[in-house]
Image (cartoon, coloured by chain):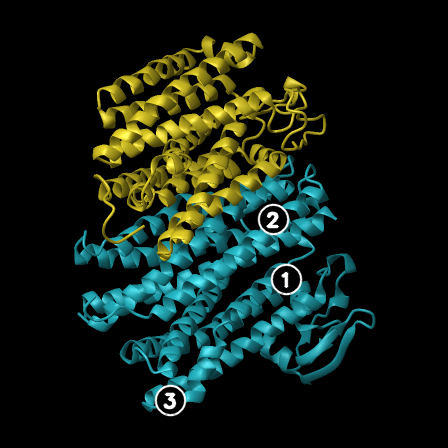
Chain colours: A cyan, B yellow
Amino acid sequence: MTLIYDRLQFAFTVSFHYLFPQLTMGLALFLALFQTAAIVGKDPLADRALRFWSKIFAINFVFGVVTGIVMEFEFGTNWSGFSRFAGETVGQMLAVEGTFAFFLESSFLGILLFGRERVGKGLQLLAAWMVFLGTWLSGFFIIGADAWMQHPVGYTVGPDGVAHPSSLWALLFNPWALTQYAHNMAASVVTSSFVVAAVGAFYLLSGIHREAASYFLRRGVLLGLLSTLLVIFPTGDRESQQVFAAQPTKAAAMEGLFQTEKGAPLILIGQPNLKSESLDNPIFVPDLLSFLTYHRFAADVKGLEAFPRSDWPDNIPLVYYAYHIMVGLGTVFAAIMVAAGVMLAAGRLGQSRWLLWTILLTVPFPYIATTAGWITAEAGRQPWLVYSLFRTVHGTSPGVNAGNALFTFLGFLGLYLFLGLLFVFLIGKRIVEGPPGESA
Amino acid sequence: METLWFVLLVVLVGGYVVLDGFDFGMGILLPWLARTEGEKRMLYRAIGPVWDGNEVWLIAGGGLLFFAFPKAYASAASGFYLAIMIFLWVLILRGIAIEIRSQLTHPLWHSFWDGIFFLASLLAALVLGGFLGNLVTGIPIEESGSWFLPLWTYFVPSSRHGIFDALTLLFSLLSAVSLGRHGATFLIVKTEGEFRERIRQLALQLWKAEVALVLLSVVLMLSTRHLFLARCAHRPLGVAFLALAALSLPLVLFFLRRQRELLAFVCSSLFLLAAIGATAVGLYPYLLLSSLDRAKSLTIFNAAASTPTLRMGLLWFGIGALLILGYTFLSYWSFRGKVRSEGEGY
């Protein structure tokens, strides 16, 4: 029972936390570009964009910070077994992140937000890029910590039963981390592109702030077009190939593949049936999965039956749906951005109300796709905490009982519901207030 | 090597208590000090640009404990489960309160966040004191090595107490009063005029309460013949820290009276650092002292990461520590001087 609450609490707190950093990291890129256009290109519109979005960035940032501190301590509170095992590897990556990246962002953010009258243009420009660097570096170390749980490298397990790293570089440059990082950062730019473009679309549809709105829309669609394509190819393609190569049980669960098949089909829709170990109501493209994975239509793809049941992910339908939601939404995003890009090139995006409406209404979905992607990665990693090395059941804190774990889980549910409402209210208020006037 | 990392950990904890300590103190004093919206705004502006930098010290300290002493991190975080969760919740609410308060100009909105900020700061200081109390009095680490403390049982100090009993509550109270006084000392540096004078008067009052609580806890620890003070007194470094604490606390009063605000703040910080230093020396080499069986305690040797890993860590932490110091200096330097109630920000 405790294990369930421990898992639910970690899953909930980390998923809620990551709603904020994904916008922080993507928006940091936008802010750096706005700042560059404003200072180097002397574009007054870019300066207005910077002032508007940096206020939203600041609110988003603080929600990310306060919910992020929780994560660092939850390893010890609920997962002390894991902390003992992985303190020198995962703990080391978190310590590096805390020491290097976090203060870089927080210090330069202060200058970016309040430095307009205090410091020179050069330092303001530097601050914007340092905030970008800090947030992206932060993401790199956290992905590095996660990558060691997905694909442990550069370690030996000593007689004390603890994983000892052989070198820092092996941890930092885990090949798994590099692929996952590229995929994740592209996804974070997708989220921010839709947010920036959607605010532009909202103003255009409402017939207000036309000049700033077109600017937001154009920048959002350009970066959105680039990132929605990058998130699929090459990063998504590489990510799925490395899952097939190194985590065959996760890969089979993702695809809903129970039997090993020569010329495996790509499932578009269907419901995994755990009793019959097959998919109900499948709609599929024959041989395509084999081709996508091994670039040969007749290649063998291993199904779950090839592995002992004790190594199957314990929630196969969740992994399967999460993966299909991510891939499905990712495809839709690319289609929307390509359509928007074509209209933009034709100079008609501002007039096509249906496309503006589509962009506006799509805004929650990148968050869903990102969360679904992380559920695929982490629920698919089960029953391991560190893949093929350390089982989740051995990771919990023996002293913490179900009553205490549920108490704090409910506490987080309540507190984060309040934070979520507060965030939507504050961001909504900022958007309704609109970008600052030209003279301000 | 273990000792070196223990020192680094104590330095980070000390830095955190001194820096975030005055943030807590400001929150505790908020309802007693500020009469008008302008005064409140000045208090928020005194800590606004620096609070999240101050919390970096907590994040770095937590990361360091996780990395350098994984067994102690695992043991302490799961054993103090409820108190740590509550500490995290109030840190969330404090951070949100500081940043969100200025987003609306409605007076009820301000009152609401002021109330949250006060309660969260007070609770944070109480819990922090409770942690200190438990480190000193020891915790019931069992035969199996696992332990879990409820928040309280009957408040009677015993070997199987909750996190809060009469003795650790004394530390909590001391922490709240001390950090309140520390916060006031910091605010005097950042304010001027009649408002500053009022803060100074409050700091003087709190100083008396603080001294009374310090003496009470020292007497209690002497009377229970706690090994902690004896160990401290037998080590030259411990004596030095105790002497520094005994010297800096009266100096706070001296400089407060003489209106030397910056020196008073320096002495106040020195006092907190000396108290933490003395605690560390008294504990060394223990990290978590078992109140049931001394042999079951976690020491820096049996809880540490392997020596090659600790050596690996020196490489990046050396660079990181310089950056942290540089950053802390930079952010205090760029927001130096007195705060005003007009203009943009918090």
Q: Which circle marks residue A411 in the picture? A: 2
The chain letter for the residue carrying disc 3 is A
Label 2 crowding class (10 Å Cα cut-off): few <14, some 14-19, many 20+?
A: some
Label 3 crowding class (10 Å Cα cut-off): few <14, some 14-19, many 20+?
A: some
Vertical placement of residue A370 versus B286, above or below? below
Vertical placement of residue A214 versus B199, above or below? below
Q: Which residue is mark 3?
A: A343
| Camera sees residue A152 | no
Label 1 crowding class (10 Å Cα cut-off): few <14, some 14-19, many 20+?
A: some
> How many badges with numbers are in the image?
3
Residue B274 image-quadrant placement: top left
Q: Amino acid at mark 1?
A: Gln
Q: Earlier in the sequence, mark 2 or mark 1?
A: 1
- Residue B343 pos. (x, y %): 23, 52
Label 3 vs label 1, nearer the camera: 3
Question: Element under label 2?
Answer: helix
On the same chain, marks 2 and 1? The answer is yes
What residue is rendered at 55% in x and 69% in y? A368
| Camera sees residue B334 | yes
What residue is rendered at 71% in x and 79% in y? A270
On the same chain, marks 2 and 3? The answer is yes
Q: Which residue is mark 1?
A: A247
- Residue A286 pos. (x, y %): 68, 85
What residue is rendered at 39% in x and 50% in y? B110
